[in-house]
Amino acid sequence: MPELPEVEVSRLGISPHLENQVIQTIIVRKRQLRWPIPEDIHQAEGLVITSIRRRAKYLLLDTSKGSIVLHLGMSGKLCVVDSDTEVKKHDHLDIVMQNGVCLRFNDARRFGSCLWQGRDEPTLSLLASLGPEPLTDEFDGARLFELSRSKSVAVKNFIMDNKIVVGVGNIYANESLFIAGIDPRKPANKVTKKRYVQLADIIKKVLASAIEQGGTTLKDFMQADGQPGYFAQQLLVYGRAGENCDACRSTIKSVTIGQRNTFYCETCQR
């Protein structure tokens, strides 16, 4: 599932080709994604895309009347192609510019979404309750510590809660907790403030590094096959159950926390 760095890389990849361009038409081939694509989406036709923003794992294509809100779901991909490029299986949505450039949304599993946020309408519920972005000053260890005092859930689940902080998905929660030396099973209210300060700083660095690595493949967004330029990951624990920990050579363990695979080192993480 694309996480925050992949979504940010997508934003960086498509923005130069779409910002300040006029939307000529929106072609919906499969309206039923995670939620039905609303007819209101066509309000964007004839309008300029003034900016492309990311909020959590959502991309917002802003116009004067409102924003097209995209989510990649489990398998969604965005690519920039010429409007006459052959349509492939699972190409469910085209946002076509007047200059012939097309933003194409492909989603084999159809867990992604495309919604409309009107400029003067109430904020969509899926955006209204989101916590701060992890790469901003609003997110820090003091906030994590304060909000964790009444939370007995596993610390991994705590930092993956979008009301606490957005965009810390499963891969980066595993990696950040390993670097911080915190057992992902540990109750959130048992982690000290000092360790939360360290963890918040590590989360920022891990996500920023992942985004930076993804930047080297942005040219791939222009390929007609639509494959995005996701970064090459050098993972320390995620997906490495049964392998030796690089730090101490102990065997990396795996357990399910909150219905998600969790990877950790019993020696390095306490």
Image: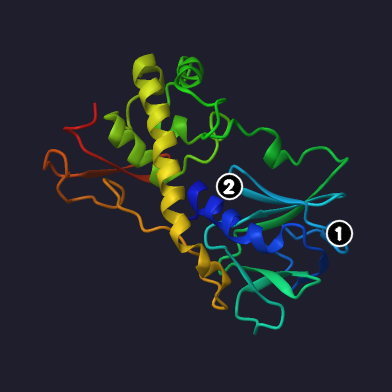
x then y, percent, for residue 201: 40, 28
Task: Between residue 197 and residue 123, name the one nearer to us.
Answer: 197
What secondary structure is found at the residue carrying circle 1? loop
- Residue type at the position of mark 1: Leu
x then y, percent, for residue 177: 33, 34
At x 81%, y 71%, the residue is: 98
Is 153 on the left or on the right of 16, as rendered?
Answer: left
At x 47%, y 22%, the residue is: 144
Task: Indicate which disc, 1 or 2, sits on the residue closer to the N terminus.
Answer: 1
- Residue type at the position of mark 2: Lys
Is 54 on the left or on the right of 83, as rendered?
Answer: left
Q: In this view, does 199 lie above or below 120?
A: above
x then y, percent, for residue 44: 84, 59
Residue 81 in sight here:
yes
Residue 192 in sight here:
no
Residue density around tag 1, few if under 14, some if 14–19, many if 20 or more, within 10 Å: some
Task: Between residue 190 and residue 69, name the one nearer to us.
Answer: 69
Q: In this view, does 175 lie above or below 81?
A: above
Q: In this view, does 154 lie above or below 207?
A: above
Quadrant of the drawing holding the C terminus: top left
Q: Residue 47 carries which label?
A: 1
Q: In this figure, which colouring scheme has been used for the structure?
A: rainbow
* Quadrant in the picture for residue 40: bottom right
Residue most extreme to the left: 249
Q: Which mark is residue 57?
A: 2
At x 36%, y 58%, the residue is: 232
Real-space Cα separation, disc 1 to disc 2, in angstroms: 24 Å
Q: Do the residues labelled 1 and 2 touch (CB within 8 Å)?
A: no
What secondary structure is found at the residue carrying circle 2? loop
Q: Tell which tag, 1 or 2, sits nearer the viewer.
A: 1
At x 57%, y 34%, the residue is: 133
